[in-house]
Image: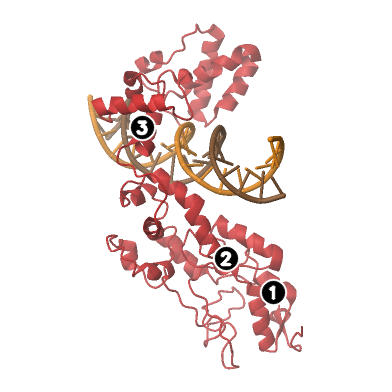
Chain colours: A red, B orange, C brown
DNA sequence: AATGGTTTCAACCGCAATCAC
DNA sequence: GGTGATTGCGGTTGAAACCAT
């Protein structure tokens, strides 16, 4: 794939020439930098460095931004006189100016709006201020419980499509919903042990090693502690997102465990008979050399995947939300993040990990008396 | 009251999609 | 169909508000 930039017509070029006279060496520099810019992806700092070295620091600093604008030409600045534009919080006077102008002329042509309205703001900033704050149909104030439920439900279907979520919550903006999600709902879900990305309970909150240890003990087996740690280390089991990784790290600090598995229900049988395989129906363990084939129901045998939040919300009266194709096609396995492929891959890989060739299965299990506390 | 840490949310940024010519 | 302009979107930032000590 080529990395070239398209250089526009000459009038575009002349319109962007700096107001100060260019030195001949600067013109040469521009040409050189233009070639560099066309053939590589360099940023302003790199250009500044090059420019400093070719022109001398005292002269370069003020000019380099303008020159860089010429070099990158492919993208016009979003506003004219960007340097003199005001940024930061809007004053009541500015708000009034914007409101008055939009009442008279309507919310259109944001590029010329600030100039016509007498605002020293970027058009983009005006649009955002209007859309997120000044629009008359915006509902301010705290989100109701109903709104919160709707957001959670929609997020489980749509993910971070804030504008789509906002479209179904009259009076709320995408920005507001996004902020509310990040500051309130997300935290609350985490506190409840629900993954805010997948909307499923987080198995990584379980101490897998202690579960395994107690089961091994019940079975009269002793597991080599090193192997136990190895088997429950996230590196062996797929890590799918940073959040899980972070939490896994936290848990690891305490317990040296916590693979970030994402089941909505995890059933650990209270009794395991000799007939039941230790790893039971957890699927093909996928070991390249030592494949522990699935057999009877066992420790992981009764794992069931259910719609947790979605089931919980079924009776909450949000029928206005039409099911998406994904929802309609989904089986009982319901992982709401990533693409279909990612989800499929993740689910099928949950228990796929490799045991090194040098590993002797006897290192894992050895018959010793149960541990006593 | 002062200080430092945390939370909140308006505003910004960069990119992509869409529109207009 | 190509190009530049405009708009929309999601992630991120940072100042102000809030809270704990």
Which chain does the residue under circle 3 lie in?
A: A
Q: Determine which residue is flagged by label 2.
A: A260
Which chain does the residue under circle 2 lie in?
A: A
Q: Determine which residue is flagged by label 3.
A: A127
Image quadrant in which you'd find residue A73: top left
Task: Residue A332 in the image: state x and y as whole percent.
Answer: 39, 73
For numbered disc 2, what is the local secondary structure? loop
Tag shown at residue A228: 1
Instruction: Look at the image and tell me whether residue A44 can be seen.
Output: yes
Q: Nearer the viewer, mark 2 or mark 1?
A: 2
For numbered disc 3, what is the local secondary structure? helix
Q: Earlier in the sequence, mark 2 or mark 1?
A: 1
Q: Real-space Cα distance between discs 3 and 2?
A: 42 Å
Instruction: Look at the image and tell me whether residue A110 can be seen.
Output: no
Residue located 59% across and 74% down the image: A287
Disc 3 packing (10 Å; few <14; some 14–19; many ≥20): many
Total number of numbered discs in the rendering: 3
Task: Residue A291 in the image: state x and y as whole percent.
Answer: 58, 78
Q: Looking at the image, which is closer to me, A261 or A362?
A: A261
Q: Earlier in the sequence, mark 1 or mark 3?
A: 3
Say if mark 1 contacts mark 3, CB within 8 Å.
no
Task: Residue A188 in the image: state x and y as whole percent.
Answer: 51, 59
Task: Residue A218 in the image: state x and y as whole percent.
Answer: 66, 88
Which chain does the residue under circle 1 lie in?
A: A
Residue A177 in the image: above or below residue A109: below
Tell me whether marks 3 and 2 sit on the same chain: yes
């Amino acid at each position: 794939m080529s990395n070239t930039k398209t250089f526009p017509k000459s009038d575009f070029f002349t319109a962007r020439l700096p107001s100060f006279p260019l030195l001949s060496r600067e013109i040469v520099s521009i040409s050189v930098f233009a070639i560099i810019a066309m053939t590589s992806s360099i940023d302003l700092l790199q250009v500044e460095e090059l420019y400093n070295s070719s022109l001398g620091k005292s002269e370069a600093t003020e000019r380099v931004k303008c020159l860089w604008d010429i070099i990158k030409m492919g993208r016009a600045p979003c506003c004219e006189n960007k340097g003199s534009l005001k940024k930061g919080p809007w004053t009541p006077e500015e708000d009034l100016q914007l409101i008055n102008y939009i009442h008279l002329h309507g919310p259109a042509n944001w590029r010329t709006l600030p100039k016509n309205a007498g605002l020293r703001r970027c058009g983009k900033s005006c649009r955002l201020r209007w859309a997120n704050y000044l629009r008359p149909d915006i509902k301010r104030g705290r989100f109701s419980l109903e709104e919160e439920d709707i957001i959670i439900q929609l997020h489980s279907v749509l993910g971070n499509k804030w504008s789509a979520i906002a479209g179904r919550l009259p009076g709320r903006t995408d920005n507001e919903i996004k902020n509310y999600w990040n500051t309130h709902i997300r935290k609350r879900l985490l506190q409840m042990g629900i993954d805010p990305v997948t909307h499923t309970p987080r198995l990584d909150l379980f101490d897998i090693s202690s579960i395994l240890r107690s089961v091994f003990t019940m079975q009269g087996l002793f597991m080599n502690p090193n192997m136990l740690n190895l088997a429950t280390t996230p590196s062996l089991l797929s890590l799918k997102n940073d959040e899980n990784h972070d939490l896994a790290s936290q848990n690891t600090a305490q317990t040296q465990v916590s693979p970030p598995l994402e089941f909505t229900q995890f059933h650990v049988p209270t009794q395991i008979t000799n007939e039941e395989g230790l790893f039971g129906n957890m699927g093909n363990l996928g070991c390249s050399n030592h494949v522990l084939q699935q057999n009877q129901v066992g420790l992981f045998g009764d794992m069931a995947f259910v719609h947790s939040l979605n089931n919980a919300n079924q009776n909450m009266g949000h029928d206005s939300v039409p099911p998406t194709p994904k929802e309609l096609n989904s089986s009982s396995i319901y992982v709401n993040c990533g693409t279909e492929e990612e989800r499929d891959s993740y689910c099928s890989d949950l228990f796929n990990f490799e045991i090194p060739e040098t590993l002797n299965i006897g290192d894992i299990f050895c018959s010793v008396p149960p541990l006593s506390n």
